[in-house]
Image (cartoon, rainbow, N blue to C red):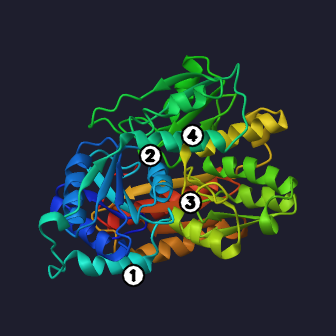
Amino acid sequence: MLKYFGTDGIRGVANRELTAELALGVGRATALVLGDEERRPVLIGRDPRLSGQMLEGALLAGITSTGLDAILVDVVPTPAVAFLTKELGCSAGIMISASHNPLQDNGIKVFGADGFKLSEQEEAKIEAWIEDDEVPRPIGGGVGKVTHKPSAVELYVQYLKNQVSLDLQGLHLALDCANGATSALAERVFQAFGAKVTSFHATPNGVNINHLCGSTFPEKIQSLTQEVGADLGFAFDGDGDRILAVDEQGQLLSGDQILAIIGLQLLRENRLPGQKVIATAYSNGGLRKAFLDQGGDVLFAKPGDRYVLESMQSAGCILGGEQSGHIIFLENSTTGDGLLSALKLLEMREKQGKTLASLAQAMVVFPQSLVNIPVAQKEGWQDNQRIQEVIRQAEHELGPLGRLFVRASGTEPMIRVLGEHPDAMVLHACVERVVQTIREEQGSSRVS
């Protein structure tokens, strides 16, 4: 088990757990491990949260202290960092973001020269250098320099435009940018295809990212889409790597439904290798049934987009995703991309000549309950006899038609409980017993 890296990079409360000192060590270690003989620079981007500037400065100090140069691209979505790292020929890319987490948190995600997130083995090599003070220290002209290149994001915007064939004339879109990294980009990307766009929560000030908006508050984009009379709505998270959609009837489409709409069309076109897509244990059971009904299938990875990607590469799949809205198009991108996912979804809608509401009916959503339990201690629940007994009882009651999935979050002090069953009353009764027991045993009195 790694000390600093979790399921999605390094994450914690900025200036308490994720300190400037730690960021300096990460920057230096990243340069030492991923720097190559060509001395190619390291690219750094960030979301708009205030602590990002502090961490950016510390990362720069660490990188340049090894003699490597750094390129700053300022506030950009995470997928832009992945794309630009490869496009600009960098040795590594670093995104400073805590994604959908609240303001006080921040994170560091590291990408290799190929634009992919690092493997656990590569992260372990970086960790070995973080606290090692016996490192090369060039002086004079040997110290690295910093190049400020915010205009590089235009390469990413052009890349997005090239990924789809779309005419959105006459379509009105509502966007919730979460006061995050897509705020300066999303509206003009969709306008470039002819759409009328009304944007909300697109004025980041450093302290309002994800605050009662974005993909973690999907009810907001539902109501906003209706208020402005838009045809469709899209909600992004803080770093722009996930998306949720609102259809023409005002119904929310989860990542599972987006995956179904796109994946089933690729299946019909015989463009889905192995007739399979990748999802996770959090995905709704209706997703797999929809694919099985049409001769395809769904394979399941551990929760986390890095594990979805690993499973995609292992199984030779080109499409995978999570219920939260992380969708990976391996033929187009190396990581989840909310803007790309929205464009691909709109392309499928146009190609089939149907509404999203109609396309979404291909997947029958099973009743599902997901509860995130803030806990004082997220370790040890697996060994707690009372918790395990309640879980076993719930699994028995849910029986062969349902399922129960319990795990600790890899990025937050939470334990997540997911239940699924065709009978909503049976489902919620079972989940509530498990949630209440974990809350009592793990020291929490709040449920979100």
Q: Residue 334 carries which label?
A: 3
Closer to us: mark 1 or mark 2?
A: 2
Residue 78: image location, x then y, percent: 44, 51
Contact (CB < 8 A) between labels 1 and 3?
no
x and y percentages locating residue 22 in the rendered image:
20, 66
Of tags 1 and 3, which is closer to the observer? 3
What residue appears at the point 58 percent right and 66 percent down from the top-left corner? Answer: 308
Mark found first going from the N terminus, 2 or 3: 2
Check disc 2 and give the amino acid type.
Pro
Local crowd at mark 1 within 10 Å, few (<14), some, or many (≥20)?
A: few
Residue type marked 4: Gln
Please identify, in this view, whether the residue under mark 3 or under mark 4 is nearer the observer: 4
Going by the numbered disc 1, the residue's amino acid type is Asp
Q: Earlier in the sequence, mark 1 or mark 3?
A: 3
Residue carrying label 4: 158
Q: Which mark is residue 77?
A: 2
**Location of residue 204 (image quadrant):** top left
Say what amino acid the circle numbered 3 marks: Thr
Give the label, 1 or 4, closer to the camera. 4
Q: What is the number of the mark on residue 383?
A: 1
Q: Can residue 264 be seen in this view?
A: yes
In this rendering, the label closer to the viewer, 2 or 4: 4
